[in-house]
Amino acid sequence: MEPYAKHGKTSGFEKKVTMTDTSISMKSIEDLQHNPEDSNKPYRFFVPSYQRGYRWGKEEVSALMDDLSVFFDTQTIHHDYCLQPIVVKPREDGSYEVIDGQQRLTTLLLLMQYSDPFKSGGNYSIAYATRPDSREFLHSLNADSPATPEHAEDNPDFHHMALALETMRNWAREHGKDRPDMFNFLSVFRRRTKVIWYEITSGKDESIDLFRKINVGKIPLTNAELVKGLLLSDDGFDANEKRAVANEWDRMEHRLQDDALWCFLTNDIEGEYQTRIDLILDIWLKAQDDAPAIDHTHNRYAVFNHVYGGGHDNGCQTLLRDMWRSCKEIFANLEYWFENRELYHLIGYLVARRKTDKKTDVLDLYAQLSNCDKSELRGRLRTLIGKDIDLEQIPDLTYNDSDKTRNALLLFNLLTLNASTGALMRFPFDRYKRERWDLEHVHATAGGPPTDKEVNGNGSRITSPSESRRMFFEGVLGLLSNATRGEESGDGANEVDAIREFLDRKDFSEKTCDDFWTRRQTLIENKLGDQDSIDNMVLLSSKLNRGYGKASFIEKRRWIIDADRDTTFVPPCTKNVFLKYYTDNPNDFTFWSHEDREGYLDGPHGIIATLKSYLEEEETK
């Protein structure tokens, strides 16, 4: 489906911005009824033979109708609806060759014909190089047309055009829109629906080459590219200034391609931003009065619309220059925050934290932070982070409180790094987000001893399946012995004896271990207590979670040491847990004991003390 962009505020006249071989302007559907270059007749479009026919289906047409439905309430219309660019090239006969946008133009024409009960005409026309019958069929369709998709099965173009018409008819019926409603809608639709007119005025490329480049992404008609076109065509800049703008623009975009910087600023790892400098433009737009909401699904060209519709030509030039100056200031601030190790970790936390209501990125934070001086900035960050972390809740957090527990452990790691003033290590937010780091048990028994398949499925393991199961039971023995200390008889003591006897047999085949665990799991886990509390949780990548999630403490510890030796990044607090850094005078590294948990949670360098030290720090410190 081709995405739409709506509700961008534009002016009521057309400005034309000319660049080398290209011009950009905004045209309403009403504008397309009068071509000043063709005796003021309606525009004529020509679809060349290298393009496929019309192929929009129910989903695309319904999505367009849903977006346009706002125009049925004419009392609340304050913004225009802006579609993706239409890329065209003028022909000698006064018509325009459609290089990109045939599907949109065809659907809009069908919608106008369907909405006009008087068949008043005056619409633009579309001709097809190799499908002349399609032109006649298209222009014959209207609200009274008997054509249905079934009647047009033999011709794919006819079928999809009739399907689009039927979808419009069904949509109007389902939404209670009768003929007068559709006609009233038509007049507003023609005035307020705009297309970004991207005209190839000259150049060496043949149309088919341009079509190919657009469809493989070589001509990125993104919001950023259109804004850049406005900047480089601005008569307020001389040639040297335009070169400087182009160089600085390219430097910003190149810098933002660094995933370390990008993942510090945003959680966009799926490519929502086609051009990363769009983030800078969005930050600028959000600070403007009367700006539309940032919505990359439905309002992809919001910045272009806002600047282009900023007033008369001189007003547009002034707004462009002010925008560019602001964008450079925004980028300089973001770079400073990134380069400052302390700010990098604190702001990075606010961006990366998990929130149940929405995703966060620097777009939401910039206005709150950009006007602070250095001391104010640190105080503001502490306030924002303090709203996110409730110290009184920390001891009660569990695996089931996944977002809160993950946030607390992430902040614990980041504050630990900031406290290491002599170190240069920076937390890799790019890996944290791309590798989907998550909560991992320090020692887990819930899944039982690992199976052969689980062990062999992890090519990086350093132990055999039997050895992994032996270490699992040694870890359980340590935990259970610790939990039942002082008991000379009873269920706990009996289970300790049973595990010792099982280990002495030295038979750690999958079936033997599974049978033993199935008989005794409930009693053992009842004695061990809660294993999902925060004092038995660390951060680890999802890949390692899958490979080591059911391993014992001692096996995970061996892996942590091996990974650290190989310079694989392990979160500092995760590494500290398996080295028992938080435990005073540790004497047993085979299991994760009650004392180890207490040191990790409540010790002088543990979770609560570290978070409390930062959140309750004096503002003047």
Image: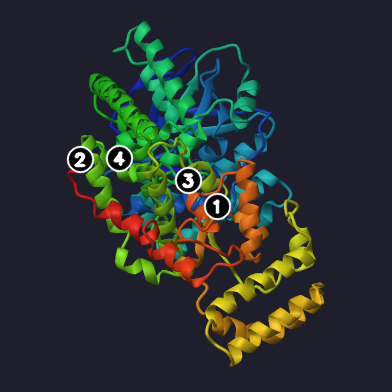
Q: Is residue 616 above or below residue 294?
A: below
Instruction: Assess disc 4: are there few (<14), some (14-19) or many (≥20) residues with their C-alpha within 10 Å of its C-alpha.
Output: some
**Figure quadrant of the C terminus:** top left
Q: Please, what is the three-letter code of the amino acid marked with disc 3?
A: Gln
Residue 42 coordinates in the image, percent (x, y)? 44, 29
Q: Are marks 3 and 2 in contact (CB under 8 Å)?
A: no
| Residue occupied by mark 1 | 436
Q: State which tag comes first along the sequence, 1 or 3.
A: 3
Picture residue at 38% right of the left edge, 12% below the top:
244
Task: Tell me the number on the disc at residue 366.
Answer: 4
Task: Tell me the number on the disc at residue 113.
Answer: 3
Report the Cα–Cα distance between label 4 and label 2.
Answer: 14 Å
Task: Tell me the number on the disc at residue 540.
Answer: none
Instruction: Assess disc 2: are there few (<14), some (14-19) or many (≥20) residues with their C-alpha within 10 Å of its C-alpha.
Output: some
Q: Nearer the viewer, residue 427 or 347?
A: 427
Front disc: 3 or 4: 4
